[in-house]
């Protein structure tokens, strides 16, 4: 058996990383988690809560976690090769 017959199919199999698709999936996960975080704080993500002063520290923590999650998605998944 020739070595090139073995290596050629293997070279195609290693390139299958979907950067933009995995980025979208990661961002969807971040959005789902921040919605749950807001819900636990008694607010709805994307709206101004009625009791803004009482929920503000919890919402600030949710926003910080959302920013960190989004930045991680951008740093990890967008750098992946596109097939």
Image (cartoon, rainbow, N blue to C red):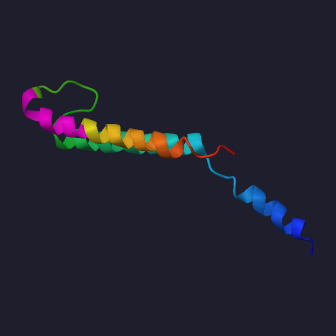
**Residue 23 shown left or right of residue 65 in the figure:** right
**Residue 60 shown left or right of residue 9 in the figure:** left
Image location of residue 46, percent across then percent down: 28, 27
Q: Is residue 45 magenta?
A: no
- Residue 51 seen: no
**Residue 3 shown left or right of residue 43 in the figure:** right
- The residue depicted at 88 percent of the width and 65 percent of the height is 4
- For this rendering, which residue is in front, 48 or 10? 10
The boundaries of the magenta stretch are 53-62
Image location of residue 32, percent across then percent down: 35, 42
Secondary structure mostly seen in the magenta stretch:
helix
Q: Is residue 57 magenta?
A: yes
Q: List the single residue furthest toward the left.
A: 54
- The residue depicted at 88 percent of the width and 66 percent of the height is 5
Image location of residue 47, percent across then percent down: 24, 25
- Residue 76 seen: yes
Image location of residue 62, percent across then percent down: 24, 39
Q: List the single residue furthest toward the right.
A: 2
Residue 49 falls in image quadrant: top left
- The residue depicted at 7 percent of the width and 33 percent of the height is 54
Identify the image quadrant of the C terminus: top right
**Residue 1 shown left or right of residue 17 in the figure:** right
- For this rendering, which residue is in front, 71 or 42? 71
Number of numbered labels in the structure image: 0
Residue 34 falls in image quadrant: top left
- For this rendering, which residue is in front, 35 or 67? 67
Identify the image quadrant of the N terminus: bottom right
């Amino acid at each position: 058996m020739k070595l090139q017959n073995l290596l050629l199919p293997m070279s195609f199999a290693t390139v299958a990383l979907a950067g933009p698709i995995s980025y979208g999936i990661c961002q969807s996960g971040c959005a789902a988690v921040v919605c749950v975080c807001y819900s636990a704080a008694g607010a709805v993500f994307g709206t101004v809560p009625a009791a803004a002063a009482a929920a503000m520290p919890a919402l600030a923590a949710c926003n910080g976690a959302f920013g960190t999650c989004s930045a991680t998605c951008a740093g990890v998944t967008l750098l992946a090769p596109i097939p």
